[in-house]
Image (cartoon, grey):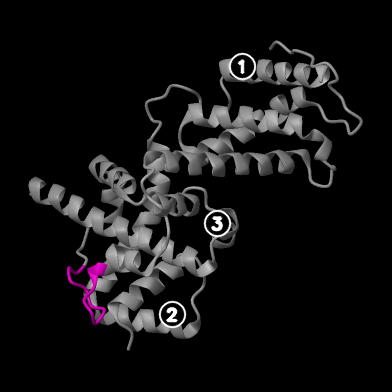
Amino acid sequence: MTVIILPGNITAAGISPDRWLDDYGDSLYRYALRKLGKTTDAEDMVQETLVAALQSRASYKGHASEKTWLTGILKHKIMNFIRIQVREKTVDDIGVLSDAAMENDAVSMFDTRGSWIYPPTDWGDPDKILHNHQFIDSFERCLKHLKPALAEVFSLKEIMGVSNQEICKKLDITMTNCSVMLYRARMGLRSCLETKWSDINNKEM
Amino acid sequence: MRSCKQISFLVSESQDRKLSFREWLSVKVHLQMCKACEQMARQIKLLRVTSTKYMSSEDHKSNRPKDHLSKEASDRIRKRLFCVSEKDKNK
Protein backbone atom coordinates (compact mmCIF):
# COMPACT_ATOMS: atom_id res chain seq x y z
CA MET A 1 0.00 0.00 0.00
CA THR A 2 1.28 3.46 -0.84
CA VAL A 3 1.47 5.68 2.18
CA ILE A 4 1.66 9.36 1.46
CA ILE A 5 3.08 11.00 4.52
CA LEU A 6 1.13 14.11 5.17
CA PRO A 7 3.22 17.08 6.08
CA GLY A 8 2.49 18.33 9.54
CA ASN A 9 1.01 14.93 10.09
CA ILE A 10 1.26 14.66 13.82
CA THR A 11 -0.12 17.61 15.65
CA ALA A 12 0.40 18.47 19.27
CA ALA A 13 -2.65 16.41 20.15
CA GLY A 14 -1.17 13.46 18.30
CA ILE A 15 -3.78 13.48 15.55
CA SER A 16 -2.78 11.95 12.28
CA PRO A 17 -5.21 12.38 9.37
CA ASP A 18 -3.41 9.85 7.22
CA ARG A 19 -3.70 7.21 9.89
CA TRP A 20 -7.44 7.89 10.30
CA LEU A 21 -8.01 6.45 6.86
CA ASP A 22 -6.00 3.32 7.66
CA ASP A 23 -7.45 2.81 11.11
CA TYR A 24 -11.05 3.90 10.74
CA GLY A 25 -11.71 4.18 6.97
CA ASP A 26 -13.27 0.76 6.65
CA SER A 27 -15.47 0.96 9.71
CA LEU A 28 -16.68 4.45 8.76
CA TYR A 29 -17.39 3.11 5.29
CA ARG A 30 -19.40 0.18 6.64
CA TYR A 31 -21.39 2.54 8.87
CA ALA A 32 -22.18 4.87 5.96
CA LEU A 33 -23.07 1.97 3.69
CA ARG A 34 -25.53 0.59 6.23
CA LYS A 35 -27.27 3.95 6.34
CA LEU A 36 -27.14 4.88 2.66
CA GLY A 37 -27.06 1.55 0.87
CA LYS A 38 -24.98 2.86 -2.00
CA THR A 39 -21.21 2.22 -2.12
CA THR A 40 -20.35 5.40 -4.02
CA ASP A 41 -22.35 7.54 -1.60
CA ALA A 42 -20.70 5.79 1.34
CA GLU A 43 -17.22 6.47 -0.10
CA ASP A 44 -18.07 10.15 -0.57
CA MET A 45 -19.27 10.38 3.02
CA VAL A 46 -16.01 8.90 4.35
CA GLN A 47 -14.04 11.42 2.33
CA GLU A 48 -16.15 14.35 3.48
CA THR A 49 -15.87 13.18 7.07
CA LEU A 50 -12.09 12.92 7.04
CA VAL A 51 -11.74 16.28 5.29
CA ALA A 52 -14.04 17.90 7.84
CA ALA A 53 -12.12 16.22 10.65
CA LEU A 54 -8.84 17.47 9.23
CA GLN A 55 -10.16 21.01 9.03
CA SER A 56 -11.60 20.98 12.52
CA ARG A 57 -8.95 18.89 14.26
CA ALA A 58 -8.11 21.80 16.52
CA SER A 59 -11.53 21.40 18.13
CA TYR A 60 -10.90 17.74 18.95
CA LYS A 61 -10.22 17.76 22.64
CA GLY A 62 -9.47 14.11 23.01
CA HIS A 63 -12.38 13.58 25.41
CA ALA A 64 -13.97 11.00 23.14
CA SER A 65 -12.01 8.35 21.32
CA GLU A 66 -10.94 9.27 17.79
CA LYS A 67 -13.32 6.70 16.41
CA THR A 68 -16.29 8.14 18.32
CA TRP A 69 -15.36 11.64 17.25
CA LEU A 70 -15.08 10.65 13.58
CA THR A 71 -18.30 8.61 13.70
CA GLY A 72 -20.06 11.67 15.12
CA ILE A 73 -18.91 13.78 12.19
CA LEU A 74 -19.93 11.04 9.77
CA LYS A 75 -23.39 10.85 11.28
CA HIS A 76 -23.93 14.55 10.70
CA LYS A 77 -22.64 14.30 7.15
CA ILE A 78 -25.05 11.46 6.39
CA MET A 79 -28.00 13.29 7.92
CA ASN A 80 -27.29 16.35 5.81
CA PHE A 81 -26.83 14.18 2.75
CA ILE A 82 -30.23 12.54 3.22
CA ARG A 83 -31.84 15.93 3.79
CA ILE A 84 -30.37 17.39 0.63
CA GLN A 85 -31.33 14.32 -1.41
CA VAL A 86 -34.90 14.48 -0.23
CA ARG A 87 -35.05 18.24 -0.78
CA GLU A 88 -33.81 17.93 -4.33
CA LYS A 89 -36.59 15.59 -5.33
CA THR A 90 -39.21 18.32 -5.27
CA VAL A 91 -39.04 21.92 -4.35
CA ASP A 92 -42.68 22.91 -4.55
CA ASP A 93 -43.48 21.71 -1.08
CA ILE A 94 -43.53 24.29 1.66
CA GLY A 95 -43.39 21.64 4.34
CA VAL A 96 -45.59 23.60 6.67
CA LEU A 97 -47.79 21.56 8.89
CA SER A 98 -51.18 23.22 8.75
CA ASP A 99 -54.46 21.82 9.95
CA ALA A 100 -55.73 21.94 6.40
CA ALA A 101 -52.84 19.81 5.23
CA MET A 102 -53.47 17.42 8.10
CA GLU A 103 -57.04 16.96 6.99
CA ASN A 104 -55.93 16.53 3.41
CA ASP A 105 -53.73 13.51 3.03
CA ALA A 106 -53.39 10.83 5.63
CA VAL A 107 -56.39 11.74 7.63
CA SER A 108 -58.92 11.86 4.81
CA MET A 109 -58.79 8.08 4.99
CA PHE A 110 -61.26 8.37 7.85
CA ASP A 111 -64.85 9.56 7.98
CA THR A 112 -66.04 12.20 10.39
CA ARG A 113 -66.42 9.63 13.16
CA GLY A 114 -62.83 8.50 12.69
CA SER A 115 -63.67 5.17 11.05
CA TRP A 116 -61.91 3.84 7.96
CA ILE A 117 -63.40 4.82 4.61
CA TYR A 118 -61.27 2.21 2.86
CA PRO A 119 -60.30 -0.36 5.48
CA PRO A 120 -56.69 -1.60 5.22
CA THR A 121 -56.39 -5.05 3.70
CA ASP A 122 -54.13 -8.04 4.22
CA TRP A 123 -50.88 -7.71 2.24
CA GLY A 124 -49.96 -11.32 2.77
CA ASP A 125 -46.98 -12.99 4.40
CA PRO A 126 -44.41 -10.30 5.36
CA ASP A 127 -41.47 -12.63 4.64
CA LYS A 128 -42.71 -13.25 1.13
CA ILE A 129 -43.52 -9.59 0.51
CA LEU A 130 -40.04 -8.49 1.52
CA HIS A 131 -38.49 -10.78 -1.06
CA ASN A 132 -40.76 -9.52 -3.79
CA HIS A 133 -38.92 -6.90 -5.83
CA GLN A 134 -42.22 -5.48 -7.06
CA PHE A 135 -43.13 -4.64 -3.50
CA ILE A 136 -39.77 -2.95 -2.88
CA ASP A 137 -40.19 -1.02 -6.16
CA SER A 138 -43.67 0.09 -5.11
CA PHE A 139 -42.26 1.18 -1.77
CA GLU A 140 -39.64 3.29 -3.52
CA ARG A 141 -42.22 4.92 -5.77
CA CYS A 142 -44.51 5.63 -2.83
CA LEU A 143 -41.64 7.17 -0.86
CA LYS A 144 -41.03 9.49 -3.81
CA HIS A 145 -44.72 10.41 -3.97
CA LEU A 146 -44.65 11.52 -0.37
CA LYS A 147 -44.34 15.22 0.31
CA PRO A 148 -40.61 15.99 0.63
CA ALA A 149 -40.93 17.25 4.19
CA LEU A 150 -42.61 13.98 5.18
CA ALA A 151 -40.17 11.85 3.20
CA GLU A 152 -37.34 13.66 4.97
CA VAL A 153 -38.67 12.95 8.44
CA PHE A 154 -39.45 9.35 7.52
CA SER A 155 -35.97 8.78 6.04
CA LEU A 156 -34.23 10.33 9.02
CA LYS A 157 -36.23 8.13 11.34
CA GLU A 158 -36.36 4.79 9.55
CA ILE A 159 -33.18 4.87 7.50
CA MET A 160 -30.84 6.84 9.74
CA GLY A 161 -32.45 5.58 12.92
CA VAL A 162 -32.43 9.10 14.33
CA SER A 163 -34.51 9.62 17.48
CA ASN A 164 -37.54 11.92 17.44
CA GLN A 165 -35.70 14.32 19.76
CA GLU A 166 -32.79 14.59 17.36
CA ILE A 167 -35.12 15.11 14.39
CA CYS A 168 -36.87 17.95 16.24
CA LYS A 169 -33.56 19.61 16.95
CA LYS A 170 -32.27 19.14 13.43
CA LEU A 171 -35.40 20.41 11.69
CA ASP A 172 -36.32 22.87 14.41
CA ILE A 173 -39.83 21.50 14.92
CA THR A 174 -41.75 20.58 18.06
CA MET A 175 -42.05 17.01 19.32
CA THR A 176 -45.75 17.03 18.48
CA ASN A 177 -45.01 18.20 14.94
CA CYS A 178 -42.47 15.46 14.60
CA SER A 179 -44.91 12.75 15.74
CA VAL A 180 -47.62 14.07 13.45
CA MET A 181 -45.29 14.25 10.47
CA LEU A 182 -44.10 10.69 11.06
CA TYR A 183 -47.72 9.62 11.37
CA ARG A 184 -48.65 11.34 8.10
CA ALA A 185 -45.63 9.82 6.36
CA ARG A 186 -46.49 6.31 7.57
CA MET A 187 -50.16 6.62 6.71
CA GLY A 188 -49.34 8.12 3.33
CA LEU A 189 -46.93 5.30 2.51
CA ARG A 190 -49.37 2.73 3.79
CA SER A 191 -52.25 3.94 1.67
CA CYS A 192 -50.07 4.38 -1.42
CA LEU A 193 -48.71 0.84 -1.04
CA GLU A 194 -52.20 -0.46 -0.43
CA THR A 195 -53.24 0.76 -3.89
CA LYS A 196 -50.08 -0.20 -5.75
CA TRP A 197 -49.66 -3.56 -4.07
CA SER A 198 -53.25 -4.69 -4.49
CA ASP A 199 -53.01 -3.77 -8.21
CA ILE A 200 -49.98 -6.02 -8.56
CA ASN A 201 -51.56 -8.79 -6.50
CA ASN A 202 -54.75 -8.72 -8.54
CA LYS A 203 -52.85 -8.95 -11.81
CA GLU A 204 -50.92 -11.94 -10.59
CA MET A 205 -53.99 -13.84 -9.49
CA MET B 1 -63.67 4.14 23.16
CA ARG B 2 -61.08 5.51 20.75
CA SER B 3 -61.77 5.76 17.03
CA CYS B 4 -59.77 3.98 14.31
CA LYS B 5 -58.19 7.33 13.47
CA GLN B 6 -56.97 7.77 17.06
CA ILE B 7 -55.76 4.20 17.21
CA SER B 8 -53.79 4.61 13.98
CA PHE B 9 -51.97 7.58 15.51
CA LEU B 10 -51.13 5.59 18.65
CA VAL B 11 -49.84 2.70 16.53
CA SER B 12 -47.55 5.14 14.74
CA GLU B 13 -46.47 6.55 18.11
CA SER B 14 -45.70 3.07 19.40
CA GLN B 15 -42.95 2.86 16.77
CA ASP B 16 -41.18 5.80 18.38
CA ARG B 17 -41.91 5.62 22.10
CA LYS B 18 -43.24 3.31 24.77
CA LEU B 19 -46.97 3.87 25.06
CA SER B 20 -48.46 4.52 28.48
CA PHE B 21 -50.28 1.55 29.96
CA ARG B 22 -53.69 3.06 29.16
CA GLU B 23 -52.70 3.82 25.59
CA TRP B 24 -51.23 0.37 25.13
CA LEU B 25 -54.35 -1.27 26.53
CA SER B 26 -56.72 0.72 24.36
CA VAL B 27 -54.70 -0.22 21.28
CA LYS B 28 -54.59 -3.87 22.27
CA VAL B 29 -58.32 -4.09 22.91
CA HIS B 30 -59.16 -2.18 19.75
CA LEU B 31 -56.93 -4.32 17.53
CA GLN B 32 -58.56 -7.47 18.86
CA MET B 33 -61.96 -6.28 17.75
CA CYS B 34 -61.12 -4.33 14.60
CA LYS B 35 -59.73 -6.27 11.66
CA ALA B 36 -59.00 -3.14 9.63
CA CYS B 37 -56.84 -1.61 12.36
CA GLU B 38 -55.10 -4.92 12.95
CA GLN B 39 -54.04 -4.91 9.29
CA MET B 40 -53.00 -1.27 9.56
CA ALA B 41 -50.77 -2.09 12.54
CA ARG B 42 -49.12 -4.92 10.58
CA GLN B 43 -48.57 -2.61 7.63
CA ILE B 44 -47.03 0.14 9.77
CA LYS B 45 -44.60 -2.36 11.29
CA LEU B 46 -43.76 -3.69 7.83
CA LEU B 47 -42.80 -0.17 6.70
CA ARG B 48 -39.90 -0.16 9.14
CA VAL B 49 -38.57 -3.52 7.97
CA THR B 50 -39.05 -2.52 4.34
CA SER B 51 -37.03 0.70 4.82
CA THR B 52 -34.02 -1.29 5.96
CA LYS B 53 -34.47 -3.82 3.19
CA TYR B 54 -34.91 -1.09 0.58
CA MET B 55 -31.67 0.65 1.50
CA SER B 56 -29.65 -2.54 1.31
CA SER B 57 -31.17 -3.57 -2.02
CA GLU B 58 -30.44 -0.32 -3.80
CA ASP B 59 -26.83 -1.07 -4.49
CA HIS B 60 -26.91 -4.77 -5.32
CA LYS B 61 -25.53 -4.19 -8.82
CA SER B 62 -22.35 -2.49 -7.64
CA ASN B 63 -19.22 -4.64 -7.60
CA ARG B 64 -17.54 -2.53 -4.97
CA PRO B 65 -16.70 -4.34 -1.74
CA LYS B 66 -19.25 -3.97 1.05
CA ASP B 67 -17.04 -4.48 4.09
CA HIS B 68 -14.06 -2.27 3.31
CA LEU B 69 -13.12 0.71 1.14
CA SER B 70 -11.89 -0.22 -2.31
CA LYS B 71 -8.25 0.52 -3.13
CA GLU B 72 -9.36 3.23 -5.59
CA ALA B 73 -11.52 4.91 -2.99
CA SER B 74 -8.83 4.95 -0.30
CA ASP B 75 -6.26 6.33 -2.76
CA ARG B 76 -8.68 9.05 -3.81
CA ILE B 77 -9.44 10.00 -0.22
CA ARG B 78 -5.74 9.97 0.68
CA LYS B 79 -4.99 12.37 -2.17
CA ARG B 80 -7.83 14.62 -1.15
CA LEU B 81 -6.62 14.74 2.45
CA PHE B 82 -3.16 15.57 1.19
CA CYS B 83 -4.49 18.47 -0.90
CA VAL B 84 -6.56 19.84 1.96
CA SER B 85 -3.69 19.70 4.45
CA GLU B 86 -1.34 21.39 1.94
CA LYS B 87 -3.86 24.19 1.43
CA ASP B 88 -4.21 24.44 5.19
CA LYS B 89 -0.48 24.84 5.61
CA ASN B 90 -0.24 27.61 3.04
CA LYS B 91 -2.89 29.69 4.73
Q: Label for residue A167?
A: 3
- What residue do we see at 36% from left, 62% from top? A184
Residue furthest right in the image: A12
Residue at x-position 63% and y-position 15%: B75
The chain under label 1 reads B
Label 2: which secondary element: helix
Question: Within 10 Å of the Cα at label 1, are there few (<14), some (14-19), or many (20+) other Cα atoms?
Answer: some
Instruction: Residue B24: give its label.
Output: 2
Say which element carries label 3.
helix
Q: Are marks 2 and 1 in contact (CB under 8 Å)?
A: no
Instruction: Answer with left or right where residue A176 lies relative to residue A74.
Output: left
**What's the mark number on residue B76?**
1
Which residue appears at 30% of the width and 58% of the height?
A: A188
For the question of whether residue B67 can be seen, the reply is: no
- Left or right? Give the position of B3 relative to B91: left
Q: Residue at x 38, y 84 (%)?
A: B26
Give the CA separation, mark 1 to mark 3. Answer: 33 Å
Kindly identify which chain the residue marked by label 3 belongs to: A
Q: Is residue B84 visible?
A: yes
Q: Amino acid at mark 2?
A: Trp
| Res B29 label | none
Q: Main secondary structure of the magenta part?
A: loop
- Quadrant in which the N terminus of chain B appears: bottom left
Q: Nearer the viewer, mark 3 or mark 2?
A: 3
Residues in magenta, as a range: A108-119
Q: Residue furthest top?
A: A2
Q: Nearer the observer, disc 1 or disc 3?
A: 3
Q: Quadrant of the C terminus of chain B?
A: top right
Q: Is residue A69 above or below residue A183?
A: above
